[in-house]
Image: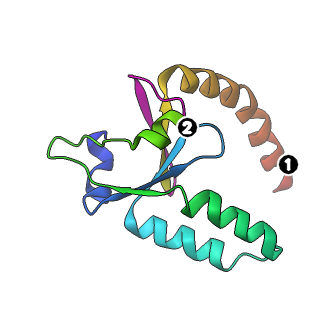
């Protein structure tokens, strides 16, 4: 874990699959806020059950070691296709963990679209 993220994660990390082929990593506080948002979501009961199973049923608590390393549970690591090189990306209220090669592709695609998205936001104001 990069040093700048370690203080927020000293009490543990909750790992869960991300929607884009990555893993999401939450501090205990961010996980609590995330679960509260899901619990109060307004959608059909069947969609909410599927969401809860997908997110909570595959979540794993984890602790960093004294050197700031985090062992990724095998089911999550395999599901996200994370090999020997991983990248940690800060995304506001949580972190994303990506396979390095997958992140390079995602980053290029995101950057290509980010400016268009930003322009559409500016037009609203």
Quarter of the figure with the C terminus: bottom right
Queried whether the magenta region covers residue 49, the answer comes back as no
Question: Disc 2 or 1, which lies upstream in sequence?
Answer: 2
In the image, 62 versus 109, the foreground residue is 62
Disc 1 marks which residue?
123
Residue sitting at x 39%, y 61%: 27
**Left or right: 48 in relation to 58:** right
Q: How far from the left and from the top, in percent, is residue 31?
A: 47, 66
Residue 54 position by quadrant: bottom right
The magenta segment is: 80-93
Q: Quadrant of residue 34?
A: bottom right
Q: Nearer the viewer, residue 32 or 93?
A: 32
The residue that mark 2 highlights is 79
Q: Position of residue 120 (x, y in %)?
A: 83, 44
For the residue labelled by badge 1, is the local secondary structure a helix, a strand or a loop? helix
Q: From mark 2 to mark 1, how far is it between C-alphas?
A: 39 Å
- Residue 39 is marked as none
Badge 2 local density, few (<14 within 10 Å), some, or many (20+)? few
Image point (49%, 57%), residue name: 59
In the image, is 58 to the left or to the right of 116? left
């Amino acid at each position: 874990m990069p040093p700048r993220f370690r203080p927020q994660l000293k009490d543990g990390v909750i790992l869960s699959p991300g929607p884009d082929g990555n893993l999401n990593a939450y501090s205990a506080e961010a996980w609590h806020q995330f679960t509260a948002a899901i619990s109060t979501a307004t959608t059909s009961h069947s969609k909410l059950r599927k969401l809860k199973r997908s997110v909570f049923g595959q979540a794993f608590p984890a602790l960093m070691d004294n050197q700031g390393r985090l062992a990724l549970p095998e089911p999550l690591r395999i599901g996200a296709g994370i090999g020997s090189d991983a990248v940690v990306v800060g995304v506001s209220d949580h972190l994303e963990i990506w396979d390095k090669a997958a992140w390079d592709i995602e980053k290029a695609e995101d950057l290509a679209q980010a400016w268009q998205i930003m322009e559409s936001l500016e037009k609203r104001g």
